[in-house]
Amino acid sequence: MKKSILLVMFGLFGLGMAAQQFKPIENYLRISARAGDPLYTTYSAAMSRSTLYGDKAYKMDYYSDCRPVSYSSDHAGTMFCIWKVDEVVIPGIGEYLAKPVVRFSFPDMAILEYEPFRGIRVRETFFVYSSSMAMVDMEVKNIDKIVHEVAAYPILEMGNDSLEIAGFDNASDGYTTQRYESPYRLISSLKTAYGYPTHVMDFFTSSYKSASHGGYNGDMQDFYNVIKTDFYSNKRGDSLNMKSTGLVDFIALHLKKRLKPGESVNFRYLRGFQDQKNDPEKLIHQVDSVKNFMLKIYFEDNLILYSNVPRIAFKSQPEKLAYLSAFNLARGCMYPPSGKTKYNFYVFSRNPLWGWGHGHQVLHESLSMMAYAYMDPKSAEGSQRVYMEQQREDGLIAYRHGPRGMQDDPHKNMSTTSSPFFSWINLEVYKAGKDKQFLADAYASGSRYVDWLIKNRDTDQDGTFEWGPYGIIENVRDWYNAVFQVSAERYLDVDKEDISDELECLDLTLMVIKEERCLAKMAEILGKTKEATAWITLAERTTKLVNERMWDETTGFYYSVNKKDHSFQFMTRDLKRQEIIGFLALWAEAAPKDRAARLVQTLTDTTKFWRKYGVPTLSAQDSWYSPNVDYCCKWNGPVWMLWDYMVYDGLRNYGYTDIARQLAGKMVNCVEVQLSKNHNYWESYSPDNENLNCPPNYIWDAIIAKLLIDENQK
């Protein structure tokens, strides 16, 4: 008996100690984000509860006055709740007494507070439990001095789609529905052969017993008329239509409670999802099993997740929101091991879900691991180990790696690789995690990869490098760039449009130099002094060639050159087009100090590169310059955060810390403006304006967290 009492006392004491340990990080992570604040609001399941196929992530809208707080999943509808208090319907945020304020935002969870009606306070927690399940928990409290009749109408809306009610399960108090989910996307559709379900079912239910339920066609104005009704009508009632079959635009549950002053009630609604091929009872059982989960456990999991993140003394609340949001972006793109990899991996985006962004890892996207490593170094190391385990025997790291294995996209009988940032990433991940075994393994793998590049990307063996024949994806810069692209118009013929395999390419050559310098630093840490010296010798030899061949004294800039004669001319084309890659000479530490000064002079010219929202990919004085982001993959003007980060890093290498800080300010401002406007990160940004039409929520923008960490290091 005494032993039992002691165990209980110890358990309570332990819980108290744990709560005290959580408090500092909880206070640090507490925010007060309103509609116009720069908060990223896309949420996905924790890595351990995620699957690559049949995955649902959600965008939270807590800022649009015309609708209630809502949660939308790409091509899979929207969940929200309409309030009615004392017969007054509150259809949208614009009508709330106190509009939503987000108090905590994690990769899989958001906690917000608002008052839809005088005297009624709601603390709402949105939680993506798994790839197939999400819930909204609403703690509703009467803070008034009078009784209030509170009704909540959770809704799953598909709009003009194919939502068909299969039935209402009375035992589990929820709707089962069927629908078709199109794999078509504007940019890169999903490949159904990989396992993306198209014929799906949903289960929509509540943990609180519903008073009624219904399915309807029309919009929320029509539904307002249903739940409000004319006060004098003889058809006035308090029940939904109890529809149990048929095609509808949305389904609704009806929850209600008479609240006395000081009294509270918890309304929780849930949405489960699966392929129609699977047993419906299994989905219902899975949703039922989490109806009454304590969310505090998952809240504390997130506190633990953030416990390693550097605690920056922020200059402003917007900076804090951008910083925390960047980690949410990175973590939210992570999946557990599956398929042909035994390590965790990422996709470019969880929501929206599109083919190219839901493919395998690519080295330039993996630059996000340099930030993510400060949150979870083991997971970042695991992501990099995906490349190591699938690296080919001859040293190749292919264009893509992941659960479907290595994808080297052969072209003209040559494998395709990616921009070689591998050892740079590994060195930065090591700095965050300090795992010597990881560093040793990464060094061995990175050494083999650079050997492969030397053998396969310097085909004329002249010491500088050319991209492979499928350069249009290998060199990262896709379409719309002024040097590799033959014509101002875009023709979808790789061999005619891309000439990067016919040039000695400045960008690739500088990347190889950077890899060699990073391998030298890794060798030094590992005690391999002779190997470190050998890597430095290689880097310096190539650096000498860059300065002999690729520097133009007249314009004071670095350029790619013709492979045949090392001239700045290709056929009738002048290759002296000032692109952002010229500044990578600072990042690779390849520029002598006097040339670095001239580069910085060009960089800070407001008529060329020193623009409002960062450094564009092409000089604003170039005839092909376009500041508009009207599609994906444009390299003739837009700002790409990763490449701006490389410029920032290069400036610091040469002691231009004040200018680097100014560039960091432009980058953070750029991100904050978009997060404030639409609460998204983006593939690329306009250097001059605020309107964007390109893929949102790209993982590589997590580099902003690394930027802010660098800026706050003494």
Image: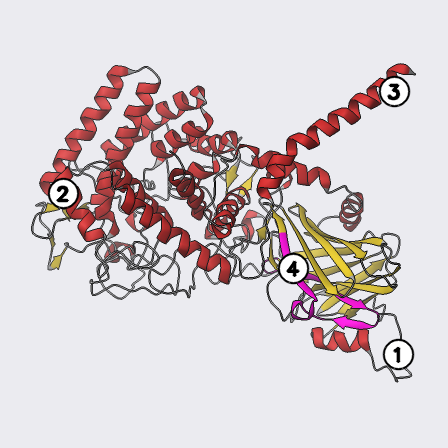
Q: Which residue is mark 1?
A: 236
Mark 2 and mark 1: span between their CA atoms? 81 Å
Residue 472 percent across, percent down from the top left: 30, 51
Q: Which residue is mark 2?
A: 595
Q: How many marks?
A: 4
Residue extent of the magenta highlight: 73-102
Residue at image coords 42%, 46%? 704
Q: Amino acid at mark 1?
A: Arg
SS at mark 3 in the image: helix
SS at mark 4 in the image: strand
Which numbered tag is attached to residue 329?
A: none
Q: Residues within 10 Å of mark 2 (few under 14, many from 20)?
A: some
Residue at image coords 49%, 35%? 310
Q: Amino acid at mark 2?
A: Arg
> Which of the 4 image quadrants contains residue 13?
top right
Q: Residues within 10 Å of mark 1 (few under 14, many from 20)?
A: few
Residue 411 percent across, percent down from the top left: 31, 46
